[in-house]
Image (spheres, helix red, strand yellow):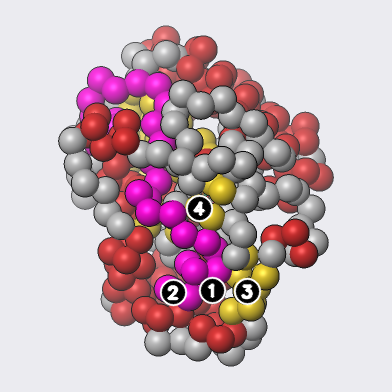
Amino acid sequence: MKRLLVTGASGLLGINLALRESTRWDVTGISNSHRLVGVPFNVIPADLSTDEVIRQLIEINRPDVVIHCAAMANIDECEKSPDKAALINSIVPGRLAEVCSKRGVRLVHLSTDAVFDGDVGNYLETDTPHPLSVYAQTKLDGEKAVLDACPQAVVARVNFYGWSLTGKRSLAEFFYNNLSAGISVNGFTDVEFCPLFVNHLVDLLMRLSKGSHNGIFHVVSPVALSKYEFGRRIAEVFGLDDRLIRPVSVLDSGLTARRSPRLTLNTDKLKETLQIVLPGVEEGIQAFAEQYTAGYPQRLQGYLSQ
Ligand SMILES: NC(=O)c1ccc[n+]([C@@H]2O[C@H](COP(=O)([O-])OP(=O)(O)OC[C@H]3O[C@@H](n4cnc5c(N)ncnc54)[C@H](OP(=O)(O)O)[C@@H]3O)[C@@H](O)[C@H]2O)c1
């Protein structure tokens, strides 16, 4: 069996990716502050902040493929600790890419739709980014560091949702948790995005990892919608009361970091490269709800050591 190393295996993407691929690959997942128990893959707790740890992880595990999901992904935390954000989101990916390049290891690095300012929307991979936050700037710097050190790597700009270990990580969980408890929430009517269901993202990342593709790819849903509309669709699929979602402007939200209003990415390059039809928003939300019915959120939360 080929070896897959997943960093950020305790995060939203990493845990779903490591679980989904664990029957097809010999998976090793790296966690940091969260401890995983009983998962069907190897786990190594490690802080990736130092050069030496990264080098050792690659040399000891000798993976065929690395999917680098680890990041400082909390936008407001990045505003508060810009140096730490630069280390985790820019410097660490560059170091990892350097080691992967030297060892001939295939690398898929995760970036974000937020590298754009969202003024125009429908961004191509070749459009000039304009990050509005520390998080977005450090992720953009991370893309460059990766491709400078390892031009063969794939950089995937993403936006996704799914069930997480803590049950609180994704926007879909936020809407589900609050609406099912009868709590009113804000839904931004002026922030558009292209959210992809996490397992659909996993499948696309694994396909990209297999070919000889390289460079930047937009790996998001082909359909754009507002965060308010996304919340309404979550309410609908779970039979919850969508009147609990207040349609509001992001400008009135009091959030620390600036958000980009039209974070919609063009996916033509991805579709043409992989010769596929991308799954739509309805299909993703339906699959998210089916996981709930199958008890997946509880199973996930059982993997988190208290
Ligand atoms: N969620 C989204 O919709 C979204 C949108 C755009 C881009 N992205 C990008 O997609 C990727 C995955 O995001 P996510 O939502 O899955 O993130 P997440 O849930 O916040 O998980 C982040 C992961 O990184 C790990 N990590 C943080 N600092 C670390 C360190 N110093 N050493 C080792 N591991 C460390 C965390 O480990 P512990 O928790 O164990 O500390 C966790 O496993 C990131 O690159 C993110 O920027 C996500």
- Toward the viewer: 17 or 145? 145
The structure residue drawn at horizontal position 35% and vertical position 21%, both measured from the top left corner, is 214
- Which numbered circle lies on residue 247? 3
Q: Quadrant of the N terminus?
A: top left
- Image: magenta residue range: 207-234
Amino acid at dot 3: Pro
**Other-residue count near label 1 (Cα within 10 Å), few / some / many at <14 / 14–19 / ≥20:** many
Amino acid at dot 4: Phe
Question: Which quarter of the figure has residue 109?
Answer: top left
**Other-residue count near label 4 (Cα within 10 Å), few / some / many at <14 / 14–19 / ≥20:** many
Q: Which residue is mark 4?
A: 193
Q: Quadrant of the C terminus?
A: bottom right
Q: Who comes first in sequence, dot 2 or dot 4? A: 4
Q: Which residue is mark 2?
A: 234
Residue 193 sits inside the magenta stretch: no
Q: Nearer the viewer, mark 2 or mark 4?
A: 4
- Toward the viewer: 102 or 304? 102
- Which numbered circle lies on residue 175? 1
**Other-residue count near label 3 (Cα within 10 Å), few / some / many at <14 / 14–19 / ≥20:** some
Q: Tell me the CA gap for discs 1 and 3.
A: 13 Å
Residue 281 pos. (x, y %) = 35, 61
Q: Nearer the viewer, mark 1 or mark 3?
A: 3
**Other-residue count near label 2 (Cα within 10 Å), few / some / many at <14 / 14–19 / ≥20:** many
Question: Which quarter of the figure has residue 2?
Answer: top left
